[in-house]
Image (cartoon, rainbow, N blue to C red):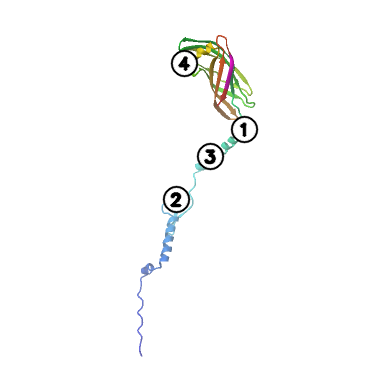
């Protein structure tokens, strides 16, 4: 009887080599898991926010916020709400009142003296009435700064500051202003034109006013600059009177 030879037994493989011979898919899964655990629980976290469980670094609980930060946040929120409230209230009041700018006018003027001390130095005595009007029916205003300048052509020949005052609603204030020029230099062409105007009985002066106006809406104060310009035509001195004028007022 013939006996068949038995196949040799498979070689024994150590456990370490068996793990190394595992499938590539299993190796990928294990590697991905290790990377995920390292990403979710980094070892760089402070000791107060982590603890060791089974060899992994796990978060114990979120860090507590400083009470000062909460107080600051609440204060900023309340301040923002108050700011929005007062802004809306001011806008409503502003639209209800509709503030208008004051008006400046020169209803009367007189020219007493105009002569040249030398071919280029002017002497003049000019007086006019400044009319300040508050057209607002529901708003009082204050003039904190008032400056008036007198020009002949483009040359300033006199300047004067007025005292601040307050105007009630729909009120008109008249102020007498005297502008005296003494030995004011004028370019030869301007001096010649002024003398020609005196001979023709038509002297043209220009007034420029700069004012700072202030008014209040509740606890909020507003201020702005106001600019006025006037052109005046007068007869020749010594009895020079106003024969025509035009004024404009703007911010």
x and y, in percent, of residue 216 in the image: 59, 28
**Real-space Cα separation, disc 2 to disc 3, in angstroms:** 30 Å
Q: In what element is the residue under mark 1?
A: helix
Do the numbered discs 2 and 4 sit on residues whose CB atoms are within 8 Å?
Answer: no
Q: According to the image, label 1 marks what residue? A: 95
> Toward which corner of the image does residue 251 lie, by quadrant?
top right
Mark 4 neighbour density, 10 Å: few (under 14) some (14–19) many (20 or more): few
**Which mark, residue 8?**
none
N-terminal-most mark, 2 or 1: 2
Q: In what element is the residue under mark 4?
A: helix
Q: According to the image, label 3 marks what residue? A: 76
Q: Which residues are magenta?
A: 242-247
Q: According to the image, label 4 marks what residue? A: 189
Q: How many marks?
A: 4
Query: As drawn, is 116 to the left or to the right of 176?
Result: left
**Residue 108 appears in the figure:** no
Q: Nearer the viewer, residue 67 or 160?
A: 160
N-terminal-most mark, 2 or 3: 2
Quick one: which residue is furthest to the bottom in this view? Answer: 1
Mark 3 neighbour density, 10 Å: few (under 14) some (14–19) many (20 or more): few
């Amino acid at each position: 009887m013939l006996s068949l030879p038995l196949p040799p037994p498979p070689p024994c493989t150590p456990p370490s080599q068996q793990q190394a011979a595992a499938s590539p898919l299993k190796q990928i899964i294990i590697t991905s898991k290790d990377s995920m655990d390292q990403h979710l629980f980094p070892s760089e976290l402070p000791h107060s926010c982590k603890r060791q469980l089974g060899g992994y670094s796990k978060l114990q609980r979120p860090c507590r916020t400083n009470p000062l930060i909460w107080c600051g946040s609440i204060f900023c929120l309340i301040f923002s709400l108050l700011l929005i409230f007062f802004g809306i209230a001011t806008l409503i009041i502003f639209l209800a009142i509709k503030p208008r700018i004051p008006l400046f006018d020169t209803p009367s003027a007189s020219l007493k003296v105009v002569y040249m001390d030398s071919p280029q130095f002017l002497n003049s005595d000019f007086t006019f009435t400044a009319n300040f009007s508050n057209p607002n029916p529901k708003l009082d205003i204050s003039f904190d700064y008032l400056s008036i300048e007198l020009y002949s052509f483009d040359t300033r020949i006199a300047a004067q500051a007025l005292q601040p005052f307050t105007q009630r609603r729909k009120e008109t204030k008249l102020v007498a202003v005297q502008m005296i020029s003494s030995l004011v230099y004028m370019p030869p062409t301007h001096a010649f034109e002024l003398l020609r105007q005196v001979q023709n009985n038509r002297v043209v002066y220009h007034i420029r006013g700069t004012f700072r106006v202030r008014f209040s809406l509740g606890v909020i104060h507003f201020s702005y600059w106001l600019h006025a310009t006037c052109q005046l035509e007068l007869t020749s001195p010594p009895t020079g009177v106003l024969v025509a004028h035009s004024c404009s007022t703007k911010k």
